[in-house]
Amino acid sequence: MRVVIVTESFPPDVNGVAHCALQTARHLVDRGHHPLVVAPAPAPGNKPDASGPCPVVHVPSLPLPGYPQVRVALPSRRLAAALIGHRPDVVHLAGPFVLGARGMAAAARLGLPAVAVYQTDLAGYARTYLGAGEAAAWRRIRSVHAAADLTLAPSSAARGDLEAHGVPRVRLWPRGVDTVRFRPDRRDEALRRALAPNGELIVGYVGRLAPEKQVELLAGVCALPGVRVVVVGDGPSRPGLEAALPGAAFLGRRTGDDLARIFASLDVFAHTGPFETFCQTVQEAMAGGVPVVAPAAGGPLDLVDHGRTGLLVAPGDAGAVRDAVALLAADPALRAAFGSAGRRTVEGRTWAAVGDRLLGHYADVLAARQPVVAA
C-alpha cells in the first residue's frame, strides 16, 4: 500500500502530532508499505533526522506568532506534486488544520481516499489564547473532517466532541506507547538524588510549557512539605512558570531514553492541561510504573482508571491537584499499587498493535470506495 502522510508537524519537532506521525510512518514501513511524509519545514538550524523511516517532503513554513516552536506551512505546489508523484492508495491527514486542509482539498481533486486523524483541541486553544473563536475553530474542523472518508478520534471524549459538532464517520483510534523504552526498571537512584537531595517525593510534569497546559496549577504541590516538583519541557510559558513554581526543577526538553529514565524516576506524575484529546505523557508515565494525577477531562478519562491506576481531579482546580498528590505522598503502598496497575494496563498498547488497527481502518476505507458490482 502506498500512503502519503500529510502532517502539521514532524520530527525534529517534539509534540504529539509529530510523534504519532513518525510512529505511523515507521509501522507502515515495518509492515511492507510505502509511506511518504509531507510536513512543514523545521526552523532554520533545527536539522531533520536523515535516518527517518521514509522520505519527507518539506513545505516552506513560518513560525506561529507568539509561539515560534510551532511552524505553519505556507501555500506550496510541493504538496500536490507529492500526491501526484507518490500515487497513494490512501492520504493520511495528521491533525489537519492548515497543511492538512490543503491536503484534503488536493486529495478530493485527485479522487484519493483520505483518513483524517483528529489530534488537537483547536477550539479549546482558541478559547485559551484568544478568548474567542471557538465556533470558528469548530467550523474549520468540521469542514476538513467532513470531507474525509473517515475521521479517527484518539479518545472517547474526542469522538463525542466531534460527533456533537456534526463531524460524520468517526471511529476510535488511540495511540500506542513504547513499552520497551518506557518501563519501571529505568528508575535511576543517582538521578533521584540529584533532583531530590533530601529524599523528597518527586512529582513530575512532562509536556509543552504553554498557557493551555495550565502548569501553574502545580503551585500548591510545590508548597507541600517533602515534595520536589520537576518540570520537563519547554515553551513560551517557561519564564512565568519559573516564577510561579518556587523550588521546582526545570529540566528543559528531554527525549528518548533520557526521558524514559526521568519518567521511571518519578514518584507521581501530574498532568494539568484540560484540553488533551489523548495525553501521551500519561500513558508513558503509566508504562514507567508511575501513578498518575490528571484532570477528569478529554483523553485522561480513557487512560486513568480512577482509584486503580491514578486519580482524576476536577479540571482547573489547583487545590484538587495538591490534595491528590498529598494523598499519594502519604501512602507509598498506594503509589506502588497504582504504578503496577498502570504498567499492566498499557502493556498491550504497543505502537505495533495500534498501527495494525490503523491498517484495518485504511482497508475499510478502500473497501468502501470499491464500486458495487451488480449480481
Image: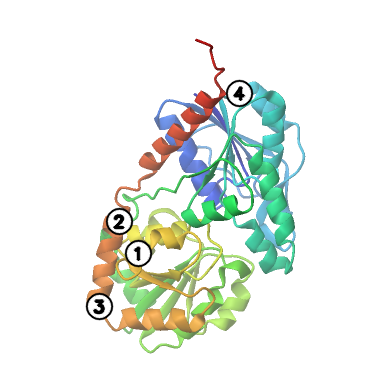
Task: From this view, report whether residue 367 is shown above or below residue 282.
Answer: above
Q: From the viewer's perspective, is residue 365 above or below residue 22?
A: above
Closer to the chain start, of discs 4 and 1, is 4
Q: Residue at x 24, y 69 (%)?
A: 337
Rendered location of residue 277, percent (x, y): 53, 56
Residue under numbered circle 1: 305
Report the Cα–Cα distance between label 3 and label 2. 20 Å
Q: Is mark 2 on a helix, strand or loop?
A: helix
The colour scheme used here is: rainbow
Mark 1 near mark 2, Cβ–Cβ under 8 Å?
yes
Kindly report which numbered mark, 1 or 2, lies closer to the viewer in this rendering.
1
Say if mark 3 contacts mark 2, CB within 8 Å. no
| Mark 1 neighbour class, 10 Å CA radius: few under 14, some 14 to 19, many 20 or more | some
User: Residue 276: horizontal and vertical position, in percent?
Assistant: 53, 60
Q: Which residue lies under the disc numbered 4?
A: 86
**Residue 28 image position (x, y, % from top left):** 45, 32
Q: Which of marks 3 and 1 is nearer the N terminus?
A: 1
Q: How crowded is mark 3: few (under 14 residues within 10 Å), some or many (20 or more)?
A: few
Q: Where is residue 219 in the image (x, y as percent from the top left)?
A: 51, 83
The residue that mark 3 highlights is: 332
Q: Is residue 194 above or below residue 206?
A: below
